[in-house]
């Protein structure tokens, strides 16, 4: 019984509590009187009569469904995230006005370890080659402070000074980083067996060696990773490989699923749980195409939680391997497969906001790749992201901008960014616009982010946006730093915190669609044939807007089904309880169905709407594709 | 107005005291798709919509009961959703299985988990558990007994596997 009690207690501790104050604030906000002449909660309480209660029950049932949807949406994002950085308008402008202060270290079997000063454009050899990097010649170097850990010729080393000599740490086939950005792991592997050991950030042993269980191995196809004290292991030599998170100290293995690629792992220092970004095979559609990214929380004990799937941008062929979490864990740099170029396969860099799952494209972030893998490495401040593919081609992106530029500098899959000494201070020149004019910072709280940004930028200030899901004032500025009224000068930065909570519906499985449904719209078949292709004798399209109001459209049974005795359901559409015209799929129709069911309300561009086909949640784009696939081409 | 504010202040303090055990209870009974805090929030919202928390005879029990009701309703809805999903998307994304030592507990019905948690962890009597679950004491005894039997079977299988 004590074991059962312990398990029940552990189950009760799963997840991160939001806190009583946060819950209270949310509930108070929802119970507050509406703006448009609504009654207070007390008035509502006072007039509760049995009759009202009975009527309310029906409403409660409807609210519950909406509530579930909202609750579910809420589970996918509950901690702050930063998606937009500050100042510069473009990466090139940032390169022109700032210094990256970065040394980029990389290894090569012939050239050895080279260190490139990104600002100066100079490259020095820190450890001369040739060197054997077998079995992992693409394993990234590991950065800890200013030191670099690497393995060569079967031994691990730490290079604490690019101009010094590396210190021997003992036998190792390769080294890899701990997800907390503090620990360093070494692995010694042979064909059939292996062991791992743990080091601290100075290279001192802190655990191991632990023998990898028989039949499992650290897969070098998707690079060695650690997450919350567990090592990612693969079982099976050929795809599909099964991914496990193995705890060396306890010996337990956590089954994660069939895996195509891993992207990266991240754990806040001191946290017991970390995030794993990976691409499960089950996330792909149409064979191994259009694979989605999955973020899974993994802890040292217990079950993986908060598994979230992030769809690739609509015009890409899906996520591929490689990428890196930013140092604060809020942004994930990842790659999506792009249309192949004349040079071969290609990929594009995207930035994923970990809290909200939003995917941001980076202009100019296209790279060539050999295998479906890119490399990405943030500098320690999280301002600069260096990335590339194969043939080796280094690009850089400045956080806060939306583009990337190519650098004519060497780099490889092994590259790691180190802090460079500050460059000599140039003679100070005063920009014409920065004439130390000061003013009181205006109050932009409760404005939308665009309006707030416009106002502040017109005052000569720069703006950084952060997102927090407080559910207090969705889409509005919750907080500004510094506070309104503070004395500021032109060019100063103001941080705006936006309430990112979307008070609208969502479904649990936004990718659920009938087979072959992600095909691009094509000239449609005859309407009858299109309708006959819809499963279950017709379809039901359901749209719920951001306020929980819904429209339901039912397609009658096909003529064939009608012939078979099914008279067909009425083709009804309801908007807020009122019937509207339903577009029939009659012969010769050229008008797209989409026009009728998408925006019939007073919110033509409602970003919070949710859609479903036959009861399944789908994205707006998928709904559009569905509609278009039923539409004969004019 | 003054009395209303006083009641709200008392409610807030009372909820702060109730929150931690309530959140644990929600984490135990919730379906996998739902966040425990959201469940607590919804229960609180519904409870406050009727009257002040401090006006309930036993607010902790009422909130637990509301959580159980919410889970029961959601379970029906989620069941339909999952069945529909499985029927129409044979090739699309499926959740991977995550074997762990909590898996057997997660396979129990939410109400079974609730009964076990209240009886085993919180040490409540069967009549108190029956109040929370809205069933009779006899039914609760049977529920707990069935759940324990099922857990024993699964734990034995786990031991055999190891």
Image: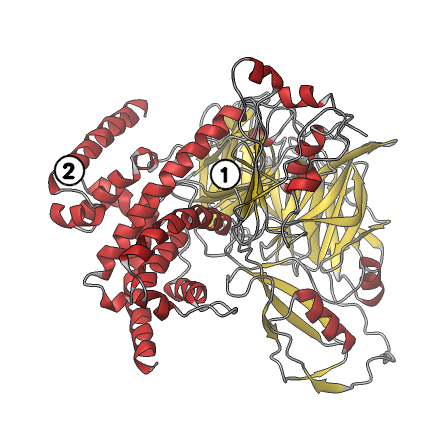
Q: Are marks 2 and 1 on the same chain?
A: no
| Residue, disc 1 | A231
| Residue, disc 2 | B139
What residue is rendered at 41% in x and 63% in y? A27
Q: Work out whether B112 lies above or below A332.
A: above
Chain at tag 1: A
Along the line of sight, the residue nearer the viewer: A60 or A353: A60
Residue A130 visible, this angle? yes
Q: CA distance from mark 2 to mark 1?
A: 45 Å
Q: Work out whether A461 lies above or below A556.
A: below
Residue A486 falls in which quadrant of the image?
A: bottom right
Quadrant housing the N terminus of chain B: bottom left
Q: Work out whether A262 lies above or below A523.
A: below
What residue is rendered at 74% in x and 65% in y? A421
Secondary structure under tag 1 reads strand
What residue is rendered at 81% in x and 36% in y? A391
Which label number is shown at residue A528?
none
């Amino acid at each position: 019984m004590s074991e059962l009690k312990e398990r029940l207690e552990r189950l009760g501790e799963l997840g991160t509590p939001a806190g009583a104050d946060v819950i209270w604030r949310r509930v108070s906000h929802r119970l507050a009187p509406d703006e448009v002449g609504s009654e207070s909660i007390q008035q509502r309480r006072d007039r509760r009569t049995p009759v009202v209660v009975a009527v309310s029950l029906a409403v409660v049932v409807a609210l519950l469904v909406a509530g579930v949807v909202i609750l579910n949406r809420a589970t996918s994002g509950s901690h702050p995230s930063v998606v937009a950085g500050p100042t510069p308008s473009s990466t090139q402008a940032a390169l022109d006005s700032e210094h990256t202060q970065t040394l980029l270290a990389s290894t090569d079997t012939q050239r050895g370890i080279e260190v490139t000063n990104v600002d100066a454009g100079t490259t020095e050899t820190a450890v001369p080659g040739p060197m054997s990097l077998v079995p992992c010649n693409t394993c990234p170097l590991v950065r800890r402070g200013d030191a670099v850990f690497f393995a060569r010729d079967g031994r691990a080393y730490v290079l604490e000074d690019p101009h010094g000599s590396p210190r021997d740490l003992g036998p190792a086939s390769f080294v890899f980083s701990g997800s907390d950005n503090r620990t360093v792991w070494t692995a010694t592997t042979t064909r059939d067996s292996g062991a791992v050991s743990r080091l601290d950030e100075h290279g001192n042993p802190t655990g191991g060696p632990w023998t990898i269980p028989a039949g499992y191995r650290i897969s070098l196809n998707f690079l060695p990773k650690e997450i919350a004290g567990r090592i990612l292991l693969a079982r099976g030599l050929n795809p599909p490989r099964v991914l496990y998170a193995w705890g060396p100290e306890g010996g337990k293995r956590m089954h994660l699923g069939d895996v195509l690629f891993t992207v990266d792992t991240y754990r806040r220092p001191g946290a017991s749980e970390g995030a794993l970004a990976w691409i499960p095979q089950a996330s792909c559609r149409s064979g191994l195409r259009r694979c989605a990214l999955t973020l899974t929380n993994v802890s040292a004990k217990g079950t993986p939680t908060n598994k979230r799937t992030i769809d690739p941008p609509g015009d890409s062929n899906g996520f591929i391997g490689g990428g890196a979490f930013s140092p604060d864990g809020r942004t994930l740099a990842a790659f999506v497969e792009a249309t192949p170029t004349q040079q071969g396969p290609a990929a594009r860099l995207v930035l994923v906001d970990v809290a909200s799952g939003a995917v941001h494209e980076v202009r100019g972030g296209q790279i060539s790749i050999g295998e479906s893998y890119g490399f990405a490495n943030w500098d320690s401040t999280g301002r600069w992201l260096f990335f590339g593919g194969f043939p080796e081609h280094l690009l850089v992106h400045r956080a806060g901008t939306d583009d990337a530029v190519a650098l004519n500098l060497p780099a490889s899959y092994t590259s790691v960014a180190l802090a460079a000494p500050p460059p000599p201070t140039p003679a100070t020149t005063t920009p014409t616009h920065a004439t130390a004019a000061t003013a009181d910072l205006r109050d932009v709280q409760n404005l939308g982010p665009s309006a707030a940004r416009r106002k502040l930028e017109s005052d000569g200030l720069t703006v950084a946006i952060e997102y927090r899901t407080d559910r207090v004032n969705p889409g509005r500025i919750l907080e500004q730093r510094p506070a309104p009224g503070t004395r500021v000068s032109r060019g100063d930065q103001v941080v705006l915190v936006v309430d990112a909570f979307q008070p609208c519906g969502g479904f649990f499985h936004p990718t659920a669609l009938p087979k072959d449904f992600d095909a691009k719209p094509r000239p449609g078949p005859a309407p009858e044939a299109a309708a006959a292709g819809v499963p279950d004798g017709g379809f039901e399209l359901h749209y719920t807007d951001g306020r929980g109001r819904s429209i339901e459209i039912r397609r009658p049974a096909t003529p064939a089904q009608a012939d078979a005795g099914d008279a067909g359901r009425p083709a009804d559409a309801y908007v807020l309880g009122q019937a509207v015209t339903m577009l029939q799929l009659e012969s010769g129709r050229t008008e797209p169905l989409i026009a009728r069911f998408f925006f019939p309300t007073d919110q033509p561009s409602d970003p919070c709407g949710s859609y479903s086909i036959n009861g399944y949640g789908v994205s707006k784009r998928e709904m559009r594709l569905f509609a278009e696939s039923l539409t004969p081409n004019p | 107005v003054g009395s209303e504010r006083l009641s709200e202040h008392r409610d807030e303090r009372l909820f702060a005291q109730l929150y931690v055990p309530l959140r644990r209870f929600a984490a135990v009974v919730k379906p996998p798709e739902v966040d425990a805090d959201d469940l607590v929030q919804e229960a609180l919202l519904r409870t406050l919509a009727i009257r002040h928390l401090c006006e309930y005879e036993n607010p902790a029990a009422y909130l637990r009961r509301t959580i159980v009701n919410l889970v029961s309703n959601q379970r029906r809805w989620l069941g339909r959703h999952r069945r529909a999903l499985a029927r129409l998307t044979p090739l699309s994304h499926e959740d991977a299985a995550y074997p762990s030592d909590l898996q057997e507990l997660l396979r129990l019905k939410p109400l079974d988990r609730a009964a076990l948690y209240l009886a085993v962890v919180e040490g409540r009597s069967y009549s108190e558990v029956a109040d929370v679950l809205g069933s009779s004491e006899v039914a609760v005894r049977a529920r707990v007994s069935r759940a324990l039997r099922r857990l024993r079977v699964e734990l034995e299988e786990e031991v055999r596997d190891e």
